[in-house]
Image: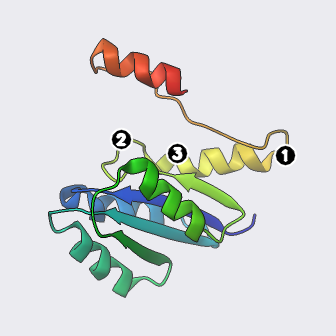
Amino acid sequence: MALVSVIIPVYNVEAYLRRCVDSVLAQTHAQLEVILVDDGSRDGSLAVMRELAAADPRLRLFAHRRNAGQTAALASGFRAARGGVIVTLDADLQNDPADIPRLLDRLAAGDCDCVSGVRQQRQDSWVRRLSSRIAN
């Protein structure tokens, strides 16, 4: 499979960031780049991103000067992506990075152009469940 770009928008997730990036890198895909887009975080997220990137050349960093929202952060990541396959992931681990190989395997089967994961159970309010259902 070609280069895989994993785009992770980052906003005030310092507490989760190391675990998220470590989990993505543990997927052992030989051709992998991880694009971290800081969206104007006010915590130490950007400092953690820089530290992680200094230790692994597969990480690429981008930073917005101010918070522009998740959609803008994803758009920045899409513009920067070099991979033929793009995976998006929430930095707060709402999505499990361990699912990446399953998604890639399904895509590699060749009978589809896009693969999406859907949560099976959600304990959030009915408004969040409804908005997720509409988005899916």
Which picture quadrant has residue 85?
Answer: bottom right
Mark 2 to mark 1: distance in Å? Answer: 27 Å
Mark 1 to mark 3: distance in Å? Answer: 18 Å
Q: Quadrant of the C terminus?
A: top right
Using residue 21 as the reference point, say whether residue 80 is left or right of it: right
Q: Earlier in the sequence, mark 2 or mark 3?
A: 2
Element at badge 1? Answer: loop
Q: Residue at x 48, y 55 (%)?
A: 74
Residue placed under numbered mark 3 in the picture: 99
Residue placed under numbered mark 1 in the picture: 110
Residue 62 location (% of width, % of height) = 41, 73
Vertical placement of residue 16 versus 50, above or below: above
Q: Earlier in the sequence, mark 1 or mark 3?
A: 3
> What is the residue that sits farthest to the right in this orientation?
111
User: Relative to the observer, which residue lies in front, 105 or 123?
Assistant: 123
Q: Is residue 122 visible?
A: no
Q: Residue at x 32, y 16 (%)?
A: 127
Residue placed under numbered mark 2 in the picture: 94
Element at badge 2? Answer: loop
Residue 112 location (% of width, % of height) = 80, 39
Q: Is residue 59 visible?
A: yes
Element at badge 3? Answer: helix
Which picture quadrant has residue 13?
Answer: bottom left
Residue type at tag 1: Gly
Residue type at tag 3: Asp
Residue type at tag 2: Gln
Residue 53 location (% of width, % of height) = 37, 81
Q: Quadrant of the N terminus?
A: bottom right
Mark 2 to mark 3: distance in Å? Answer: 12 Å
Q: Which mark is residue 84?
A: none
Q: Earlier in the sequence, mark 2 or mark 1?
A: 2
Q: Residue at x 30, y 49 (%)?
A: 92
